Structure formats: structure tokens, C-alpha cells
Amino acid sequence: MKILISVSDKEKAKADQSPYYKALQAAGVKSEEIEMVSPSEHSVPNLRDYDGIIFSGGKDINPRHYEEALKYPGVVEVDEQRDAFEFELFERAHRRRVPILGICRGVQMINVKFGGTLYQDLRQEFSPDAAARPDHNQSAPRPEATHSVTLTDPDSGLAETFQGSCLVNSLHRQAVKRLGRGLRVTARSEDGLVEAVESADAYPFLVAVQWHPEEMVDRPEARKLFENFVAKCRELAEHR
């Protein structure tokens, strides 16, 4: 089995110190079964030899990819090289029906790839109905849970991770606005913001979450998400 983690160049530089790397190890993955890739590779890897992929957090998706102008220069930070790299990487992974786990930027990238849009800056564009609005860009330490998310689909893959609701951390400026075609919402926060999406069809495993479970693997729900993903990867490896 081999699992690929798509990260920024900065994240790849610290490799085995990465929380994504450590989260997979906590889920029973050996170091030799993990590989990191970043846009500086210049060429998108062929996924024939991989059994799963994680699209990690990082800078914002350029709004031009969902046909909007950049509204908040200096606030929104884009990485065009990574956008192009990961759009192609996702296309190859999805075509081969490889298990996919998206985290933070990952859920945003996947939503845009499916034709959806994003809130460019939640503070300026998102006006929830809920009286109590969670802080979606927390000042608390990254591993600390600051709000809850609630399942919206009891038949989802995420329902195998937790039942009803769970506590999560929150470290994002942007989020899903209009849902992409071919996706379904499977969790929301107290203020109604989309917190997780999955494939609307019978894809082997495509789960993308807005929070950072890799920072919380000491919690059963976060570890279980990685364990479920890894189980699907091993299943593919056994039949490859």
C-alpha cells in the first residue's frame, strides 16, 4: 500500500514532522507507505502505484477558478501553482477511483473542481442565521476543539466516524458557498456553514472536511476518520 499526501512546498520541507504524516502513522500506516508531493515537483505523479491520497490544508484557491474576481487582496492568499497541480492530481485520482480525503483547503479545492464556489472571506461574506456564531479562524491552539459539527446524512461515510455530532477545531478563512455538482453535504456547523462533503455517487471513499483532524488524532473521532480512509486504501491495494 502507498498513500500520497499533497502538501505545500513548505509542508513538504518538514516531511516526517508533518501532522498529516503523523496522523497516518497513528492510523497504523508505516513510514514507507507514505509519500508527500508538492507543486515544486513540476510534474503530477501517475497514480497507478498509489492507493489513496490526502489533499491537505494551505493557501486559498484563486477565485478565478470559480469565475469571481479577487475581492480581498491582502486578505485572500492564493497559490496558483498549487491550484493547477492539485486540480490535475485530483482529476487523475478521481478517474482511477482512488480513496480521497480532503482537509480544509482540500474540501474547498474539491468543491471548486466540481463547479462549486467559496466564500472568499467568511467575516465579510457569511451572515449566519444562528445567534451564536463559531469562530471559524480560532486563536486557540490548533489541537483544541472550539465548536461542534452535526451530521446531516446518517447514511454518509462520515457517519462511520461519529454519530450525531462531534467537536472540532476551526482554522479557515474560506468555506463552501455553492455546492459543486456531484457532491453532497454531510455535516454542518451550528451556524449552518458546510463542514463536510462527500461524493453523491457510489465512489469508494471521497470525504472532505473543513476542520483539521490531523491536529486532533488523540481524539477518537479524528483518529477514526483516518482509520476508515486507510482501510479503504488497503482494500484497494489488496485488489490492485
Image (cartoon, helix red, strand yellow):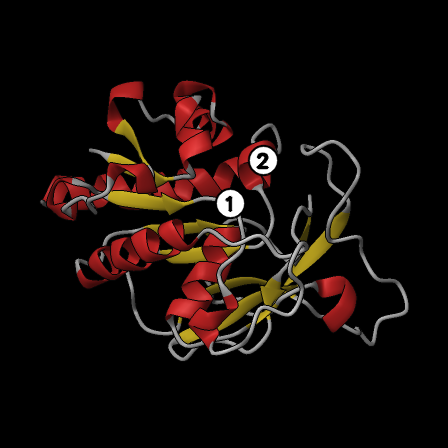
| Residue density around tag 2, few if under 14, some if 14–19, many if 20 or more, within 10 Å | few
Residue depicted at 67% across the width and 61% down the height: 150
Taking the image as drawn, is residue 153 in sight?
yes
- x%, y% of residue 169? 69, 43
In terms of image quadrants, where is residue 30?
top left
Residue 138 drawn above or below residue 135: above
Give the position of the N terminus as an image quadrant: top left
In terms of image quadrants, where is residue 187?
bottom right
- x%, y% of residue 112? 44, 69
Residue depicted at 59% across the width and 33% down the height: 215
Please give the count of numbered marks on the rendered protein. 2
| Residue density around tag 1, few if under 14, some if 14–19, many if 20 or more, within 10 Å | many
- x%, y% of residue 238? 14, 40
User: Which amino acid is tagged 1?
Assistant: Gly
Residue depicted at 49% across the width and 59% down the height: 61
Q: Nearer the viewer, mark 1 or mark 2?
A: 1
The numbered dot on residue 220 is 2
Residue 98 drawn above or below residue 175: above
* Left or right of 70 on screen, residue 27: left
